[in-house]
């Protein structure tokens, strides 16, 4: 059985209004990561990522260093301990 991890990620910088979330959805689906991404009222972008440790590491690297739209200043990553809800796909959700 494959190990599934869950991480709550907060991306700070100029990441709203530049296509960052759409790019995140595309990259997550391409990498078989499930969860969601949304804008936050403070100007950051928040994502709940779920998948194998290797796939989550790759997506977190992409969020920090990859060819993302916008300017990323900082990425905060918080592991979520089980039990956690399981996601079937990766989606954009409403701003919080």
Image (cartoon, grey):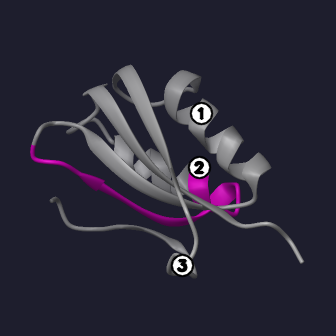
Decide: few, some or many residues near mark 3? Use Cα within 10 Å; few <14, some 14-19, many ≥20: some
Q: Residue 92 carries which label?
A: none
Instruction: Point out residue 73 in the picture as x, y percentages from the top left corner.
Output: 35, 17
Q: Name the residue under label 2.
A: 27
The numbered mark at residue 87 is: 3
| 57 relative to 35, above or below | above
65 in the magenta segment: no
Q: Is residue 12 above or below residue 9?
A: above
The relative height of residue 38 versus residue 34 in the rendered view (above or below) is above
Query: Which comes before the other along the chain, label 1 or label 2?
Result: 2
Q: Is residue 30 magenta?
A: yes
User: Badge 1 is on which residue?
Assistant: 62
Q: In this view, does 5 lie above or below 66?
A: below
Query: Which image quarter holds the C terminus?
Result: bottom left
Q: Where is residue 32 in the image (x, y as percent from the top left)?
A: 70, 63
Query: Picture quarter containing residue 91?
Result: bottom left
């Amino acid at each position: 059985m494959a190990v599934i991890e869950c991480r709550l990620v907060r991306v700070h910088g100029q990441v709203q209004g530049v296509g960052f979330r759409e790019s995140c959805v595309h990259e997550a689906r391409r990498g078989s990561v499930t969860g969601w991404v949304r804008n936050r009222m403070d100007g950051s972008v928040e994502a709940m990522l779920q998948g194998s440790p290797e796939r989550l590491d790759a997506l977190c690297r992409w969020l920090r260093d990859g060819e993302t739209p916008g300017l990323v200043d900082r990425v905060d990553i918080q592991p979520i301990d089980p039990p956690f809800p399981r996601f079937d796909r990766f989606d954009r959700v409403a701003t919080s």
